[in-house]
Image (spheres, coloured by chain):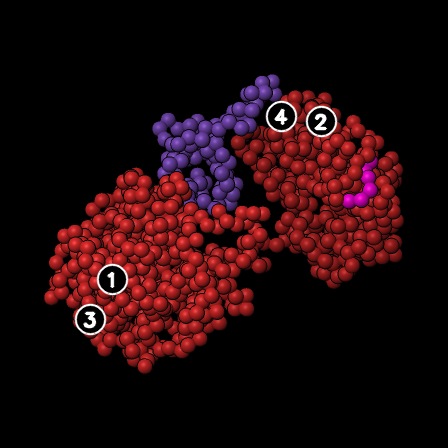
Chain colours: A purple, B red
Amino acid sequence: MLLIPCPFCGPRAEPEFHCGGESHIARPPLSCTDAEWANYLYMRQNPKGIHYERWLHVTCGLWFNVARSTVSHEIRAVYAIDAPKPEQA
Amino acid sequence: MAQARRLSCTGRIDRTRPVTFSFNGSLYEGFAGDTLASALLANGVGLVARSFKYHRPRGIVGAGLDEPNAIVDVIVGGIRLPNLLATEIELAEGLEAFSVNAWPSLSFDIGSINNLLGSFLPAGFYYKTFFLPHWHFYEWAIRRAAGLGRLSPGHETPRVDHCHAHCDVLVVGGGPAGIEAATIAAARGGRVMLVERDHEPGGSALWRTGAASIEASLSKLRNASNVTILTRTVAAAFHDHNMLMLVERDPATMRQRVWHVRAGEVILATGALERPLVFPGNDRPGIMLASAVEHYVNRYAVKPGTRALVVTNNDSTIALAETLAGAGINVEAIVDTRPAPTAARGSLPVISGSITQTRGANGLTGARIRKSDGQEHDVACDLIAMSGGWTPTIQLFVQSGGKSRFDPETSAFVPDSSMTSVRVVGSASGEGLPAAPKATRLPGRQKAFVDFQADATIDDLDLAARENFVSVEHAKRYTTQGMSTDQGRTSNANAVALLAAATARAPGSVGTTRHRPPFTPVSVGAFAGHRRNLLYRPQRRTPIHGWHASMGATFEEFGEWLRPAYYGPDREAALRRETLAVRNALGMFDNTPLGKIEVVGPDAARFLDFIYANTMSTLKPGQCRYGLMLNEQGVIIDDGVAARLADDRFWVGTTSAGATRIAAMLDEWLQCEFLHDRVIVAPVTANWAVPTITGPRARDVLAALEPDFDISADAFPHMTFREGKLAGIPVRVFRVSFTGEVSYELCAPADRGAELWQALADASAGAGGLPVGVDAWMVLRTEKGYVHIGTDTDGTTTPDDIGWSHIHRRQGDFVGRRSLLRPANRARDRYQLVGLAIEGSLAMPAVGAHLKSAISPSEGYVTSAAFSHALGRPVAMGMVRAGSQRMGETFTLSQSAGRVRIVERTAYDPAGARLHA
């Protein structure tokens, strides 16, 4: 069970959170191609290594980004929802 | 004679406190400090179980978690628990224990015929035999024959509490290594927890040597203010980020406490377990692990036999002969399977060789020894102490993400690299364990068991290898080795070595099966704790619940809410009465669970234009509009009425089930995509009670409550809302309808909901009004052809499929719009929602019934069906391939008589005259 540092509340246990999946996915405009739209809807990185994902702390309502190792589950960075991916995570 | 096998020497039992217990109905006596297993052995009870598959007689093999056979059901203090290890049960006064898997009795078990048929019951027998017509045909009888303990609904289940704790260092295992680790951690400061599954810490010191020095360290730990010692507590699971689940038990009450502990560092001092030696006939009652024999003699002062044979492949048994002699047990021979065994202490010579067979029906009477030169001779004995080497207990380490490696010295998997802040100390790390050769096939014709609990033999593993189940995971499932409640704790290392030999590989390349939580069985009731029955999840009731109950409502759960399904004892009569009341006079419906979200801010209108598939920004304050919400795949996920309360304030109505989900979705869009939109989302479902009145007399009843606003049809038309007071209660009144009649949803502050409802009930009594439940409500909307999201639609339904193609004329983007532009969404053969008229029958079509044509087994299916008392016939809707272009076509139904014809959805008042009255 992960221990996730909510930027607003501090470290809390995983059951308080909801994972929103991969982050930093740009929503394409209406004029995009079917392939671009399919890419937005379905294609995900699924890396073995650092995964940039967004989480909701359900108890306080804040969405934020997490850089997590999918191998060790180690959380390398927690950053604002509109912040870019951290350089070194 | 009572406790005939009890030694007069000390042991760690309290001889001043005798304890009476029963086993399979016979009364016995033991002492405080005994386990059920040691007390049974003290009374000379050797036969304790029947094996899982062959129903072979089995005795106690181990002295703790290494026990595969002695599984019993236990009743203590009125509580019955199934499938406990006799070696782990502390003796308690009045305890009743029963063998599992034996019928009619332990000594005469009919299932043991399986043993005679043994050669016809190889691995995979069930899969190869019971597949025609299909497995379920046989499952019932096989499950009866092969089950373990029984659940007993007549007995109480133990109470279980959950608690949470944090510590800097968590030490699992209270043996010498764990106590030393805890002592060092405690001296550094910080919070330390020491967890021991036994009722007293000490580990091997309790049955070997060193108890005195352990006691000194323990008393320091007990006095340290930063140390918590939990005994009778097993660490069952190691989760991510050093979160461990511990299960603490109280032997007197069988109550349990589940600890969720987050630790900065975890030190695993989980010790090692002795492996059985795999030799022919190695499963008779009286054949025990050598360490278990030491346990029973030294800790419990019990003599497990009188004439013993020691058979070993390593040096951990060197001191055993002395121990046995000291207990008055005659050592007949010491057999070592190694070509050049180490000499034993004492006078007895060590025979290099092995055991080829054992004798004894329900207990051991003798064995045949084969020397390495091929000579064989028989020995009479009632106890064999066996040792096949030692295996570190690394299950928790592997659960933590740690990797193991095969150590050829000890022939066991030992910890290698770790993933998290965890250390392994003591024999769990492999340190100090005796060198031992890999398990091999020894000569002899009797069954040589690898996994006693799963009844898996060497032959089964060889068969698996021959049939190409060479992956350790496949071999496990095929032979069931390692799949019992002990998860192969003592058998896995031997099984891997034997599978490696059978497939000409090294054990390290065969690898082990994955160790998964829990380490020891944990009852489902322990996971649940108090979260059962009404505490399973919060149940929501409306402020009008008491009134419904007083009117004899039958409640059902709809999502989180408990709602009246119908009033009175007879559902069919209620449906007729309630639906006709709405059509002819008035119905009162408690609509409180309807989802309500306020969306507020300067950008609210623009935001909702993006959220809804239809435009909301063109609403004027005071107006309402029905809207659909989609997901990004273009699928309809919710519907409801939105109202504009003010220029910057909207009331978003959702389905009852969607209220929480939709509010969360709005917030996610705002926080993750539209960070600069000035919008606030406030879920207000529970703030408002929503009595709803519907029917031709609705306006009369509303008037009787003396509204302070104009309710005439012209001043307050359909799809508008007003704010004001009714019977002195502040309300928001929405004139919207799910029944096709004039309807008012009267939103009052939740704490005044019951008061408003009572006023409505009083006013409607003279108007023929009746309360209406959810079931009648669904009939009314089906008569009107109103779509019910999730009933008429599924995870593929788009707006086009329910006749909403007008949204394509909108400007701008909205959630899911791009998906609607895909050619697949405009395909002509999509399933579309249509009305279905039933011809030639008054029977209701079954929901889910397929529409069949002469050439197709399914052209669609029924999604909603109801008997309309207002129309005197069934009404239905369904999803039909290209349905909107097939008006008038008829189909037969897969599960009902008669035919259905595709018609427009609205069966009742298609012109909508009643709605706008």
Query: Circle 4 sits on which residue?
Result: B819
- Going from the N terminus, do you reach mark 4 or mark 2 first? 4
Query: To which chain does the residue with label 4 belong?
Result: B
Query: Circle 1 sits on which residue?
Result: B368
Circles 1 and 2, Cβ within 8 Å, touching? The answer is no
| Residue range highlighted in magenta | B896-901
In this view, the mark in front (4 or 1): 1
Answer yes or no: is residue B38 visible: yes
Do the residues at pointers 4 and 2 share their chain?
A: yes
Q: Is residue B897 rendered magenta in the image?
A: yes
- Going from the N terminus, do you reach mark 3 or mark 1 first? 3
Farthest residue to the front: give it. B375
What amino acid is found at the position of numbered circle 2 in the picture?
A: Asp
Element assignment for label 4: helix
Q: Report x, y in % for residue B228.
A: 32, 59
What amino acid is found at the position of numbered circle 4 in the picture?
A: Ser
CA distance separating discs 3 and 1 = 17 Å
In percent of the image, x 20 and y 46: which residue is there?
Answer: B409
- Going from the N terminus, do you reach mark 1 or mark 2 first? 1
Circles 3 and 1, Cβ within 8 Å, touching? The answer is no
Circles 2 and 3, Cβ within 8 Å, touching? The answer is no
**Residue B829: numbered disc:** 2
- Going from the N terminus, do you reach mark 2 or mark 3 first? 3
Tally the marks.
Answer: 4
In this view, the mark in front (4 or 2): 2
In this view, the mark in front (2 or 3): 3
Query: Circle 3 sits on which residue?
Result: B330
In which quarter of the view is residue B105 placed? bottom left
Q: Report x, y in % for residue B898.
A: 82, 42
